[in-house]
Image (tube, rainbow, N blue to C red):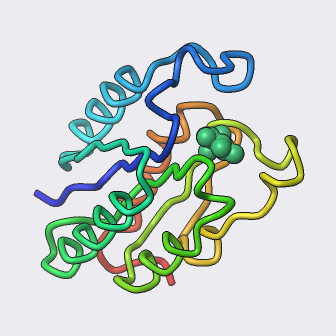
Amino acid sequence: MPSVLVLNGPNLNLLGTRRPEVYGTTTLADVERSCRATAAELGIGVDFAQSNHEGELVERIHAEGARVRRGESLGAVVNAGAYTHTSVALHDAIEGVDLPVIEVHISNVHRREAFRHHSYLSPVAVGIIVGLGVQGYDLAIRALHARGPGGWV
Ligand code: DQA
């Protein structure tokens, strides 16, 4: 049974209490439950992780790339939080292991401050879901499942 990785970056552990007018009141534990239910419905596994440390996110990406190569994973759903807008290291990690990534943002970053408009991840993502709230995670899991191991492109 293949799996997907759902990887969350800095401050997403605060989901539910941090700026609820922007991110809502759903917690990361609620998101994890919902991702697990979606994956179970699709008959795939899910690994769910969050880190506030850039290097740890890089290492999770490398490990998932190896799992994809072994046919154990379909890819990753990545909400890199603020590292989206700053991290060449995450860009290079995804590109370096050729990891199929769906980039997710809970809020519509393009309606927000200009510094959130640029993403280092988008050029190396297979798809992007922005501004649909926490359901973006479930939609991204469905997208990786529909894409399968072969890929759209
Ligand atoms: C976010 C948007 C980012 O700009 C911000 O730094 C986050 C969350 C989102 O899910 O909307 O931490 O990725």
**Horizontally, is 121 left or right of 118 in the view?**
left
Residue at 83 percent across and 49 percent down: it is 110
Depth order, front residue of 14/152? 14
The answer to whether residue 104 is above or below residue 86 is above
Position of the N terminus by quadrant: bottom left
Q: Nearer the viewer, residue 68 or 18?
A: 18
**Vertical placement of 91 versus 119: above or below?**
below
Query: Residue 113: percent from the left, percent from the top?
Result: 87, 45
Residue at x-position 85% and y-position 41%: 112
Residue 40 in view: yes
Q: Quadrant of residue 120?
A: bottom right
Question: Of 95 and 151, which appears nearest the observer?
Answer: 95
**Residue 95: image x %, image y %?**
46, 83
Q: Quadrant of ligand 1?
A: top right
Seen in the image, is 105 located left or right of residue 118? left
Q: Residue at x 38, y 75 (%)?
A: 99
Regarding residue 105, the answer to whether it shows in the image is no
> Residue 60 appears at what percent x and percent y?
29, 62
Name the spot of residue 17 as percent of width and height, x first. Answer: 56, 14
As displayed, is residue 20 above or below residue 56? above
Residue found at x 50% / y 60%: 102
Q: Nearer the viewer, residue 38 or 129?
A: 129
Count of numbered labels shown in the rendering: 0
